[in-house]
Amino acid sequence: MVAACLLHTGIRLAAVWDIQQSSCRGRCCRRGPANGGNGIVTLSGRTRAVAFVCSLRDKGLSKKPLWRTKEDMSSEAKQASSSLRLAKGEEAVARVMVTSVSRLLKPDLLALLAHLQRTDCCDLAIKVFDYARKEIWYRPEASFYFDMIYMLGRNRLIEKAEYYFLQLQEEGLQPETRIYTEMLAAYMLVDKVDKAMDMYRMMKEAGCRPNELTFTILVRNLQRLGEVAAIKEVENDAVENLEEGEEFLRNVKTRRKNPTLN
């Protein structure tokens, strides 16, 4: 029944039998009736396990990793990255953008952008990001902005993060919970409590439900800064929104001995 179900969903099963010819010579291989397709093969009274390999590659359903390492980048993307890093001054960078970056195909351009974001090359990432937004294939996506805001926030470039947060909305996108969370985390990183709480309340008004990461960032930093009134508001929301809110808060406060922002 399991095999029939897998075949019905279009998943190919490859059975790999590691059976030496010497051990199989003169013996017959049969599937025990009691096994019923459970991956066990009977060999003259002995059993061996059968390894099944499930592959979705033929159906185009497998996804590539979110981050591509430098080794995963094409030679053209690597060359563009090196040229951008070596360029000195705005004119040199603009020249590389025209001669190298503009020639990249969509996957290579996105790989280059992800590499620059991951390595905190903020100025270069901004230029490539803005260039990508002008490409004919570009379609607004919240996740595209999330990676940018995350990089800018952790590097304390608050004004740039705010700019792209507004750009996201101007393109008709609704910020997700994780984008709101990264914005308030960026504010907390530079001790802008009022802006962080405004972003938190804006998040709730927009119908985005805070998650554990949201509450962790808020509780730990509000405790660090001694914001008693704000802590009470956030803790009440945590109890209301999380299944085990009270236990979660106890754990967060216990781990406060090792302070962290995220």
Image (cartoon, grey):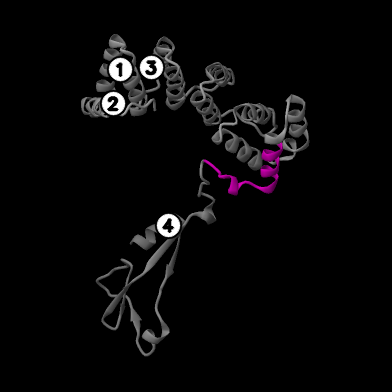
Of residue 224 and residue 55, the one placed in the foreground of this image is 224
Residue 210 in view: no
Q: Classify 62 as above or below 45.
A: above
Mark 1: secondary structure? helix
Circle 1: residue type = Gln
Q: Which residue is mark 1?
A: 223
31 lies above or below 146: below
Between label 4 and label 2, give the one nearer the viewer. Answer: 2
Q: Quadrant of residue 15?
A: bottom left
Q: Earlier in the sequence, mark 2 or mark 3?
A: 3
Relative vertical location of residue 116 with respect to residue 37 in this rendering, above or below? above
The label nearer to you, 1 versus 3, is: 1
Is residue 71 inside the magenta stretch? yes
Q: Quadrant location of the C terminus?
A: top left
Q: Nearer the viewer, mark 4 or mark 3?
A: 3
Left/right placement of residue 150 relative to residue 109 reads: left
Task: Kindly indicate whether the residue at mark 1 contacts the one at mark 2 (C-beta within 8 angstroms).
Answer: yes
Highlighted magenta segment, given as a residue range: 67-83
- Please indicate whether residue 125 sits to the left or right of residue 95 in the image: left
Classed neighbour count for the residue bearing mark 3: other residues with Cα under 10 Å, few (<14), some (14–19), many (≥20): few
Nearest to viewer (mark 4 / mark 1): 1
Q: Amino acid at mark 2?
A: Arg
